[in-house]
Image (cartoon, grey):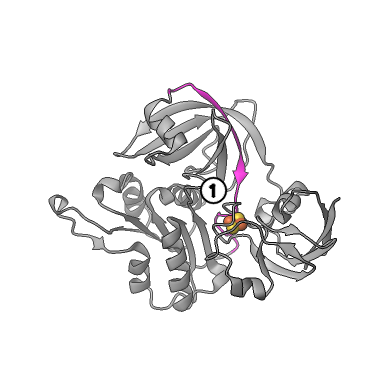
Amino acid sequence: MSKQLIIEPSGQQLSVFDGETLLDAAMREGFNMPYGCKNGSCGACKGKVLSGEVAHGDHSPTVLTSEEIEKGMSLFCCATPVSDSVSIECREVAATKDIQIKTLPTRIEKIDKVSRDVAVLTLKLPSTERLQFLAGQYIDIHTKTGNKRSFSIANAPHQEGYLELHIRHVPGGEFSGYVWETMKEREIFRFTGPLGSFFLREDSDKPIIFIATGTGFAPIKGIIEHALHHNTQREMVLYWGCRSLDDLYMPAVPSQWQQQYPNFTFIPVLSEPKPQHQWQGRTGLVHEAVLADFANLAHYQVYACGAPVMVEAAVKGCIAQGLPAEEFYSDAFFSSHATK
Ligand code: FES
């Protein structure tokens, strides 16, 4: 039997069917909750249960702690209603409200192995379909074995007709292994998207700090290309953390932006530079470089994407240095869910 969900402060009421999470029900009804991983790993969907009882479902205990549960918090992507009526507090993400999520076929146009373990895929969209998306969102690829794998869109919406994905070869990873070893150009896949609430908040004029690790650069690339295309005057700094120079797979792209746009700065940060590369740039952990450079983050927005451990450390560190919590936007890549 379905249960009732009331979403405050809008007061919207909807039904939650058996087996649905609160996020599933909200998405089905067209209410745009913020979310990322959809499996209890990132915290993007965390919010307060105002009344009624929910089952919290499988989730990471570091993302939703027992103290937070005691205070009434829940992850709406995992929570299911227990009582007949549940009311929660959740603000709608207005920007994604009118964007239709579609399942479409796509053809692999190009496979470009740009480093020892990153391939850039270009997907051609059907000429009869237009995919509306916000720079920074992701898609779910339907694999040949019936699974779904999430990948961030690395290009901006104004570059119509194709999608760019950056796929890191994960040892033992089913889909990335397929991409690396077997996939051929012109193959057809299906995908669902656009998904997620990691995108540029354009109603702000605050300067922006981007923090990426590895292929976390992908959605940030899309966001920056979008912002530059629209002649943003906001100051933007990209910190891109990789292990060594071999892993910095597209350095020419942000270097070119830096040359061309006075409001853009690129700071690569290597955690394990190799002696033979004679690296002269920044070293250490990428979020620590940001925290060292910005003692007071009160008037910034921060967008972080990549390894969960970086995102977790970055949010804590940035808030401790004055960043308002609501100005931290993130998309953490979890291998259980995806190889984004
Ligand atoms: S924890 Fe719910 S969307 Fe990631």
- Which residues are the magenta region? 184-203
Residue 297 shown left or right of residue 255 in the figure: right
> Image quadrant of residue 74?
bottom right
> Image quadrant of residue 103?
top right
Rendering coords of residue 323 (x, y %): 49, 74
Residue 120 shown left or right of residue 53 in the figure: left
Q: Quadrant of ligand 1?
A: bottom right
Rendering coords of residue 98 (x, y %): 71, 48
Q: Nearer the viewer, residue 200 or 303?
A: 303
Q: Is residue 10 visible?
A: no
Inspect the image, locate mark 1, and give the three-letter code of the amino acid beneath it.
Answer: Ala
Report which residue position mark 1 lands on.
135
Q: Is the residue marked by circle 1 packed among few (<14), some (14-19), or many (20+) residues within 10 Å?
A: many
Secondary structure, mark 1, is loop
Q: Is residue 130 above or below residue 311?
A: above
Is most of the magenta stretch helix, strand or loop?
A: loop
Q: Is residue 52 above or below residue 150?
A: below
Q: Is residue 194 magenta?
A: yes
Q: Is residue 208 above or below residue 216?
A: below
